[in-house]
Image: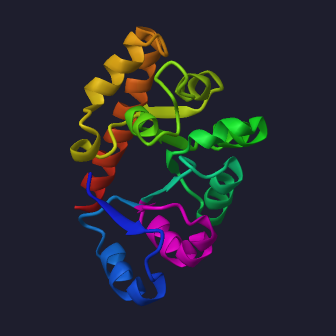
Amino acid sequence: MPELSLKWNCNIVKEMEWIDKIINCNDWFHSIDICGKEQVKNAKNFKGVFENAKSKGFKLRAHVGEFGTCLDIMHVIETLKLDEVNHGISICDDIGAIKFCVDNKIRFNVCPSSNIMMGRVTSYTTHPIRRMFHEGLIVTINSDDCLVFNRSVSDEYVNLFRSGTLNAHELEIIRNYSLENYLQSLNRGMRSN
């Protein structure tokens, strides 16, 4: 579903007027995300935009915790009241943070090939997605930028299976998380039309 994507380093004050117009129009975009180089100290600058987006039924996401810390993830989740974290593999550094995210049903959209190719994780077998899944986090498997990383979602599933990181049953559960989220997005889109 179409997503409004902002950069961590954008001048949110300068961009606020057009962003709010897009959010208030609310007949095209279904989620809002912050991406780019993680600059989590800027999270408070996005608070008003994210509150407005939430009031219009948007899913709230941010790219955080691929290179940053678990504390960074928690700061952004709590500041922006996120529904989802893109990447977020640093969550594994703190069991209390994992428990908070499980209890609050925060979803983690994980991109294994990106994490490996960016040097954050050494291989599929050492990727933290297995631990994230077994700790009870809602995780989905994603391909990140297909033009840069040359991986489809199917490739990600196959690589995680072949490496022994996740078995077929575990991958099926994760696939169902993705399908449930997609259906929720479709339902939201139908309600706004």
Q: Is residue 6 above or below residue 20?
A: above
Q: Position of residue 44 (x, y in %)?
A: 62, 74
Quadrant that contains the C terminus: bottom left
Q: Position of residue 105 (x, y in %)?
A: 59, 41
Looking at the image, residue 47 sits to the left or right of residue 13; the answer is: right
Q: Position of residue 62 (x, y in %)?
A: 49, 57
Residue 47 among those drawn in magenta: yes
Q: Is residue 159 above or below residue 139?
A: above
Residue 11 among those drawn in magenta: no
> Residue 96's image quarter?
top right
**Residue at x-position 55% and y-position 23%:** 126
Give, as a single range, the part of the protein colored magenta.
Answer: 33-58
Q: Is residue 110 above or below residue 59?
A: above
> Residue 149's image quarter?
top left
**Residue at x-position 45% and y-position 20%:** 173
**Residue at x-position 33% and y-position 52%:** 188
